[in-house]
Amino acid sequence: MAVPLLDLKQQYRALEPQIQEAVRRVFESQQFILGEEVAALEREISRALEGVHAVGVASGTDALILALMALEIGDGDEVITTPYSFFATAGAIHRVGARPVFVDIDPETYLIRTDLVLRAVTPRTRAVLPVHLFGQMVDLDPLLEMARRRGLWIIEDAAQSIGATARTNGAIAQSGTLGTFGCFSFFPTKNLGGAGDGGLVTTRDSALADRVRSLRRHGEESTYVHTRVGLNSRLDALQAAILRVKLPHLESWNAAREANASRYQELFEKAGLIGPDGPIFLPRSRTGARHTYHQYVVRARGRDDLAASLKAAGIGCAIYYPIPLHLQQCFASLRHHRGDFPVAETAAASTLALPIFPGLVEPQQEEVVDAVRRFYSR
Ligand SMILES: Cc1ncc(COP(=O)(O)O)c(C=O)c1O
């Protein structure tokens, strides 16, 4: 039985009439940029995220760029981040003219090590950009405490973590609500995905929210009056209308991903593939945190051969991310070398994402685990 890495058609079939109706509504209005659909989505997401201000933008990448621009981070500034993320994280820092300063990750969660962040701060540091990778939040408490003390900003890259939570300062908080800014992506494959590119910036600061609203439309303060140079980065009404159909389902989709992760735990255990000498290391969830499993990423002995074997058996899998950011050619000017961030490099060489999407069913998961078992028993 073939098992896809992700099946978006299944999700579309289940919501087809509502999505078609949302598209029809936008065409009837002929209002394609911002407008009431985007405003309504911003209100609905704000309600879901503890009342933060929410600003719809053109992509998750632009959300990061706009957050950095709103804080006037640029030439000569340093932003501390992880070398193990999607390219946009460091790309956005570079794009505004600042320098990404990488620190290594934790080998079990693949999240940035906050103790190393604290040591990497210099007089040029303006912000820390932690990435809530694969659907799990970084422990922000030490970063928030340091940011307060040293006058730094925290920009959460929440592109992969909508709906994730963590216990911070004794209370449960949602991803994207604790930093100066939260940056989300609605790329189609995300837990909440649109029908094209889309993104969102969140903040609790109403003046900063207004600044991002202005920056997403060329820095316009009022019609044709520009006080700063921004971007053209507005969320499409069509995307907003479709995301509004999907948003009420996000909680149950995330719960289904969690249930699938628990089932993998049982199946891998039963297959004898995990444990101290096992070839597979399963994702670790931080204590007190809700992992929403945007990706289910295992570490696997002989990863490349396993991936080839799974693909040959019709099992979808993917490598996130094969080249750590510090080794990307476009960042050669940062003068990093192999060995600078060994944990990130090991993760890049040994991790593999397996199917975890909400509609995945038990026989498909059994098939995945059995294909892994067959590979290791050769
Ligand atoms: C961690 C991370 N940051 C940023 C982005 C950028 O989002 P987008 O693809 O919507 O520009 C993504 C998404 O792909 C991501 O996974």
Image (cartoon, rainbow, N blue to C red):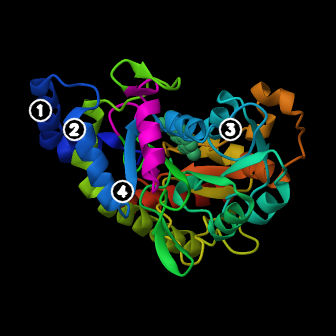
Q: Is residue 208 left or right of residue 244?
A: right
Tell me the amino acid under the disc marked 3.
Ala
10 Å crowding of disc 4: few (<14), some (14-19), many (20+): many
Question: Distance of mark 3 from mark 4, alpha carbons?
Answer: 30 Å
Tell me the amino acid under the disc marked 1.
Arg
Question: What is the x, y in percent for residue 198?
Answer: 40, 35
Q: Given this view, does label 2 or label 1 mark the residue nearer the observer?
A: 2
**On the image, numbered disc 3 is attached to which residue?**
90
Q: Secondary structure at mark 1?
A: helix
Question: What is the x, y in percent for residue 313?
Answer: 52, 44
**On the image, numbered disc 1 is attached to which residue?**
25
The quarter of the displayed image where residue 12 is located: top left
Looking at the image, is 16 positioned above or below residue 258? above
Tell me the amino acid under the disc marked 2.
Glu
- Magenta stretch holds residue 101: no
Question: Distance of mark 2 from mark 4, alpha carbons?
Answer: 26 Å
Q: Nearer the viewer, residue 78 or 89?
A: 78
Query: Mark 3 vs mark 4: which is more N-terminal?
Result: 3
10 Å crowding of disc 1: few (<14), some (14-19), many (20+): some
Label 1, ligand 1: CB separation under 8 Å: no
Mark 1 touching mark 3, by CB under 8 A? no
- For image coordinates 61% across by 69% down, the residue present is 284
- Magenta stretch holds residue 207: yes
- For image coordinates 16% across by 37% down, the residue present is 22
Query: Mark 2 vs mark 3: which is more N-terminal?
Result: 2
Question: What is the x, y in percent for residue 350?
Answer: 73, 51
Question: Distance of mark 4 from mark 1, alpha carbons?
Answer: 28 Å
Q: Nearer the viewer, residue 22 or 20?
A: 22
10 Å crowding of disc 2: few (<14), some (14-19), many (20+): many
Mark 4 touching mark 1, by CB under 8 A? no
**On the image, numbered disc 2 is attached to which residue?**
37
Q: Given this view, does label 2 or label 3 mark the residue nearer the observer?
A: 2
